[in-house]
């Protein structure tokens, strides 16, 4: 979604720690509270014992699922220790810290879970076909995967794809995305797509930490760099991939007799 901007975001924080770190975002994806609660309700209805979130960030969705599934335990995985610190704080504030563990390490081979969440993090496993196979292996028979990933709403130009650090063939359209998942052996149990409002909430929430800092510190030595990166990201969204890149939430089931 944000292309190389994630690295820029982290580099700004390293250079100017007073800038907020995703503080203006509730979810690090185009997702509203309404959609999060809807997905959490759907996932918790499977009465899972183990829920694993790959790329959990600060664990907003994982914690919602655990709150709705009181017999479940959770594992959140993310490479960013700063967001995991926020995840731990969130779990403690909601009295869920006795049922969830956070780590930077992927689950051991052979580990399984009843519900797996992977929103915006399938790249951890390489190309999407490989990610789907790996995520399916992580599921117990009869388990459910929530996959949140990008797709092309319209066929992009080379320039539009490049605005998120991609090529036109790096994503599929929505129908081909579903076909890919089903070709691996999943069944499609549910499908949601991010709305324009959810995209705008995400993109401008992503920028809000920088913009709010610039309102206070416009003459700081770091201001030109932060202003330039904020302007670049905003223009890439508004003039590049807005209404071109979509984001889908696929609820995918693994058959009971599938190993």
Image: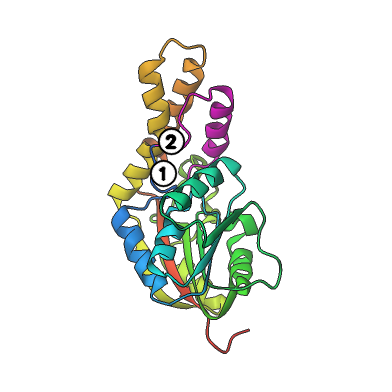
Q: How many marks?
A: 2
Q: Position of residue 117 (x, y in %)?
A: 50, 63
- State the quadrant of the C terminus: bottom right
Examine the image and state in which quarter residue 64 appears: bottom left
Examine the image and state in which quarter residue 140 appears: bottom right
Q: Position of residue 213 (x, y in %)?
A: 41, 22
Q: Residue at x 40, y 71 (%)?
A: 44
* Up/down of 212 relative to 66, above or below: above
Q: Earlier in the sequence, mark 2 or mark 1?
A: 2
Q: Residue at x 47, y 16 (%)?
A: 223
Task: Determine if the magenta segment contains residue 6.
Answer: yes
137 or 19, nearer to the observer: 19
Separation (CA) of disc 2 from disc 1: 7 Å
Q: Residue furthest right?
A: 109
For mark 1, give the secondary structure. helix
Q: Is residue 8 left or right of residue 106?
A: left
Q: Position of residue 123 (x, y in %)?
A: 59, 55
**Which residue is under mark 1?**
241
**Which residue is under mark 2?**
236
Task: Determine if the magenta segment contains residue 257.
Answer: no
Residue 126 appearing in the image: no
- Residues at discs 2 and 1 in contact (Cβ within 8 Å): yes
Q: Which residues are magenta?
A: 1-23
* Up/down of 129 relative to 1, above or below: below
Q: Residue at x 53, y 64 (%)?
A: 74
């Amino acid at each position: 979604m944000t292309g190389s901007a994630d690295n820029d975001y982290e580099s700004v924080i390293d250079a100017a720690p007073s800038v907020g770190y995703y503080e203006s975002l509730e979810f690090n994806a185009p997702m509203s509270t309404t959609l999060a609660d809807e997905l959490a309700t759907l996932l918790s209805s499977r009465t899972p014992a183990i829920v694993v979130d790959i790329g959990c960030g600060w664990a907003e969705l994982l914690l919602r699922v655990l709150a709705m599934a009181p017999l479940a335990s959770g594992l959140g995985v993310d490479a960013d220790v700063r967001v995991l610190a926020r995840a731990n704080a969130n779990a403690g504030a909601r009295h869920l810290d006795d049922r969830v563990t956070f780590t930077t390490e992927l689950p051991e081979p052979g580990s399984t879970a009843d519900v797996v969440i992977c929103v915006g993090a399938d790249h951890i496993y390489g190309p999407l076909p490989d990610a789907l196979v790996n995520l399916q292996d992580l599921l117990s028979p009869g388990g459910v995967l929530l996959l949140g990933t990008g797709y092309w709403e319209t066929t992009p130009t080379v320039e539009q794809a490049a605005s998120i650090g991609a090529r036109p063939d790096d994503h599929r359209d929505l129908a081909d995305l579903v076909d890919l998942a089903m070709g691996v052996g999943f069944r499609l149990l549910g499908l949601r797509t991010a709305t324009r409002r959810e995209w705008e909430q995400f993109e401008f929430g992503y920028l809000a930490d920088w913009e709010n800092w610039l309102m206070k510190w416009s003459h700081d030595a770091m201001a030109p760099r932060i202003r330039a990166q904020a302007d670049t990201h905003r223009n890439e969204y508004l003039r590049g991939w807005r209404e071109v890149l979509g984001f889908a939430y696929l609820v995918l089931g693994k058959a009971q007799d599938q190993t």
